[in-house]
């Protein structure tokens, strides 16, 4: 996801944080990049989603990747109960008491990590769990899923009203619809 795709999401909102969780999880777990490219892309993504700085080193990226693998399990959950169990497990293990903060010149926003200067991975997993929990509570369904297009598999957030989204993007949905049409033609 690029900055232009999420400009309309209010910084600090659960939807914005959940979109960031899906995008960073896709980058770190699904996509394949060499070390230098991965570091640059992780920095770009964090800045694009409104982080005031992205002073990452490779060790931070490796820790973020481990955190993203844990968050990925929420997107891979097959049903509501499974998603809720995974989210609750993340909250129990990684979140602390909620607090408002306005660090680094940002607007007031909610944090559930231990402190404003917490390690990137701790911040990512705690903030992602909180955002996914809020969306699950608001929508009364899993907050997203994994793209059903076999060559893709990227996590996505489902903010629609009806639910049942299967693809991460219109591009993947179109690719699968065209493939299904071609199979019928043969």
Image: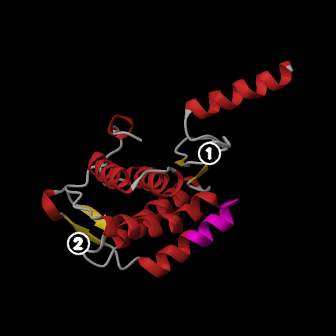
In the rendered image, the vertical position of residue 86 relative to residue 7, given as above or below = below
Residue 80 falls within the magenta-colored stretch: yes
* 23 horizontally vs 182: left or right: left
Quadrant of residue 174 within the rendered picture? top right
Q: Secondary structure at mark 1?
A: loop
Q: CA distance from mark 1 to mark 2?
A: 33 Å
Q: Quadrant of the C terminus?
A: top right
Q: Secondary structure at mark 2?
A: loop
* Residue under the point 63% across and 59% down: 76
* 186 horizontally vs 11: left or right: right
Name the residue carrying label 2.
116
Quadrant of residue 12 within the rendered picture? bottom left
Q: Are marks 1 and 2 in contact (CB under 8 Å)?
A: no
Residue 95 falls within the magenta-colored stretch: no
Name the residue carrying label 1.
147
Where are the magenta residues, as a range?
Answer: 77-86
Please identify, in this view, whether the residue under mark 1 or under mark 2 is nearer the observer: 1
């Amino acid at each position: 996801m690029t900055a232009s795709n999420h400009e309309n999401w209010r910084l600090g909102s659960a939807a914005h944080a959940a979109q960031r969780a899906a995008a960073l999880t896709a980058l770190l777990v699904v996509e394949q990049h060499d070390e230098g490219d991965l570091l640059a892309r992780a920095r770009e993504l964090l800045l694009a989603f409104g982080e005031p700085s992205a002073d990452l080193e490779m060790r931070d990226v490796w820790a973020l990747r481990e955190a993203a693998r844990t968050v990925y399990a929420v997107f891979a959950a097959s049903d509501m109960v499974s998603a809720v169990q995974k989210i609750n497990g993340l909250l129990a293990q990684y979140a602390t008491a909620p607090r408002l903060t306005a660090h680094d010149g940002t607007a007031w926003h909610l944090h559930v990590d231990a402190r404003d200067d917490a390690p990137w991975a701790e911040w990512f997993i705690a903030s992602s769990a909180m955002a996914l929990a809020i969306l699950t509570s608001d929508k009364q369904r899993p907050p997203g899923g994994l793209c059903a297009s076999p060559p893709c598999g990227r996590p996505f957030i489902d903010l629609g009203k009806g639910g049942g989204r299967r693809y991460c993007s219109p591009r993947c949905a179109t690719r699968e619809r065209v493939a299904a049409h071609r199979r019928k033609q043969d």
